[in-house]
Image (cartoon, grey):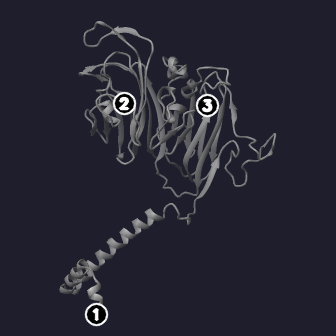
């Protein structure tokens, strides 16, 4: 290198060159190799990050399914006619009668569901006759079947699947869900499949409703055979048993990743309910877990009680206090005490802080009051995780009556 170009170098670059010149050929070659590797890795990372949104060189293709195109096939959308003509909003919705099951999608190739949007007549709009329609969010069941498995990998009340406990609509956004004021639902978790994806919706109520939906997905995705498929189950214990921890995720065997949960609490006794710790029993844990929390509100990223605040990966989207008052025995004094039910909906998503297991996993949460006494409340949960298929059947879904029991005052407010 001539003196003119040498003078243009920075001090750091001069030090690197002078150091390399002092080394023998072998050491110099090794250092140069390492510098190239680091540079290439950094450049590749930057390229992938910066080009992701505008890189159009993909083999995957975009598709969407709705009542306007029930197969997602190219050129098949918007063919239905309305009173103003063909292709002029001819089939935006469908009436779902009591007891009816509708197939939302039946895809027969590899792909990934990227987004689901849905809305319908499950709020008490002024033009509708029936009231208490939000119960539909607990009595309507969404099921998903991946790659030909006969039993569903997703089986959950629609409202809980879309981020709402107790079938009570509150508008909020998280990393997984976004909910509009008039019960427009969005879920953004990717749902991969290698051969087939089938999703159904079943109306288990005695109320008919019109449904609108859209499933956005890609095809020709290249997934490993053991790629994790999205699993979602729903559980409710009303009431829970004292000293018996509520199962957020009944034991799953095999490898997987815990994504998170939408938790519902209906208080049955006065006082603070949330001292119970969440526990992750993983990969052979028996009496004691690998991961142990410090409190119920702590688990959803809050503290010193529960506040209705929502964030991307954690928060509380509902605190509703009943207008009615009744008496129950106080846990600490056993004396009669006035109380009103509180209804809480809260969530936690382990996206930046993943929880993986290799052999097995079971997740529980305690029911402990302040200051440190065992209590009983009404708990529900929609739990989300990934695991390969074939997978074991989900825990039994509570009946429609069990799912909506004691929530009547929320349906009318």
- Check disc 2 and report its element: helix, strand or loop: loop
Can residue 139 be seen here? The reply is yes
**Residue 249 image offset from top left, x and y in percent:** 40, 34
Image quadrant of residue 374?
top left
**Residue 411 image offset from top left, x and y in percent:** 54, 21
- Going by the image, does 225 lie left or right of 44? right
Q: Which residue is mark 3?
A: 202
Can residue 149 be seen here? The reply is no
CA distance separating discs 2 and 1: 68 Å
Considering only order in the chain, which callout, 1 or 2, is on the residue closer to the N terminus? 1
- Circles 3 and 1 in contact, beta carbons < 8 Å: no
Q: Residue furthest left?
A: 22
Mark nearer the viewer, 3 or 1: 1
User: In the depicted view, which residue is nearer to us: 40 or 235?
Assistant: 40
Considering only order in the chain, which callout, 3 or 2, is on the residue closer to the N terminus? 3
Screen quadrant of the N terminus: bottom left
Image quadrant of residue 50?
bottom left
Q: Which residue is mark 2?
A: 307
Residue 46 sits above or below residue 118 on the image: below
- Circles 2 and 3 in contact, beta carbons < 8 Å: no
Q: Going 43% across and 41% down the picture, which residue do you hit?
A: 385
- Check disc 1 and report its element: helix, strand or loop: loop
- Going by the image, does 245 lie left or right of 158? left
- Going by the image, does 140 lie left or right of 80? left
Q: Which residue is mark 1?
A: 2
CA distance separating discs 2 and 3: 34 Å
Q: Going 60% across and 45% down the picture, which residue do you hit?
A: 215
Q: Local crowd at mark 3 within 10 Å, few (<14), some, or many (≥20)?
A: many
Residue 15 sits above or below residue 150 on the image: below
């Amino acid at each position: 290198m001539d003196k003119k170009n040498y003078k243009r170098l920075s001090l750091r670059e001069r030090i690197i060159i002078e150091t390399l010149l002092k080394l023998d050929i072998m050491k110099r070659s090794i250092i140069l190799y390492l510098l190239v590797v680091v540079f290439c890795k950094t450049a590749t990372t930057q390229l992938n990050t910066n080009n992701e949104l505008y890189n159009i060189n993909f083999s995957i293709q975009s598709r969407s399914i709705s009542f306007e195109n029930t197969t997602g096939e190219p050129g098949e959308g918007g063919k239905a006619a309305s009173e103003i003509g063909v292709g002029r909003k001819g089939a935006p919705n469908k009436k779902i009668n009591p007891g009816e099951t509708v197939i939302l999608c039946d895809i027969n190739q590899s792909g990934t569901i990227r987004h689901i949007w849905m809305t319908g007549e499950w709020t008490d709009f002024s033009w509708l006759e029936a009231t208490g329609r939000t119960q539909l969010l607990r009595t309507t069941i969404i099921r998903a079947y991946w790659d030909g498995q006969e039993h569903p990998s997703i089986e959950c009340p629609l409202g809980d699947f879309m981020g709402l406990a107790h079938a009570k609509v509150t508008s909020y956004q998280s990393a997984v869900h976004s909910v509009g004021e008039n019960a427009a639902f969005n879920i953004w978790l990717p749902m991969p499949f290698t051969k087939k994806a089938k999703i159904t919706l079943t109306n288990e109520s005695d109320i008919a409703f019109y449904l609108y939906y859209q499933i956005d997905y890609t095809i020709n995705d290249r997934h490993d055979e053991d790629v994790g498929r999205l699993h979602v189950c729903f559980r409710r214990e009303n009431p829970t048993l004292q000293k018996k921890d509520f199962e957020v995720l009944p034991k799953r065997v095999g490898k997987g990743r815990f994504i998170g949960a939408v938790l519902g609490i209906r208080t049955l006794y006065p006082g603070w309910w949330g001292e119970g710790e969440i526990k992750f029993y993983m990969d052979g844990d028996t009496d004691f877990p690998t991961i142990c929390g410090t409190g119920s509100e702590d688990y959803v990223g809050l503290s010193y009680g529960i506040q209705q605040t929502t964030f991307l990966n954690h928060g509380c989207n509902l605190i509703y206090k009943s207008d009615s008052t009744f008496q129950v025995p106080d846990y600490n004094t056993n004396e009669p005490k006035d109380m009103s039910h509180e209804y809480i909906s809260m969530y936690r998503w382990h996206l930046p802080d993943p929880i993986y297991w290799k052999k097995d996993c079971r997740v529980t949460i305690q029911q402990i009051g302040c200051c440190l006494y065992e209590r009983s409340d009404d708990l529900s949960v929609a739990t989300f995780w990934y695991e390969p298929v074939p997978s074991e059947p989900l825990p039994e879904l509570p009946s429609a009556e069990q799912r909506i029991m004691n929530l009547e005052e929320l349906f009318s407010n």
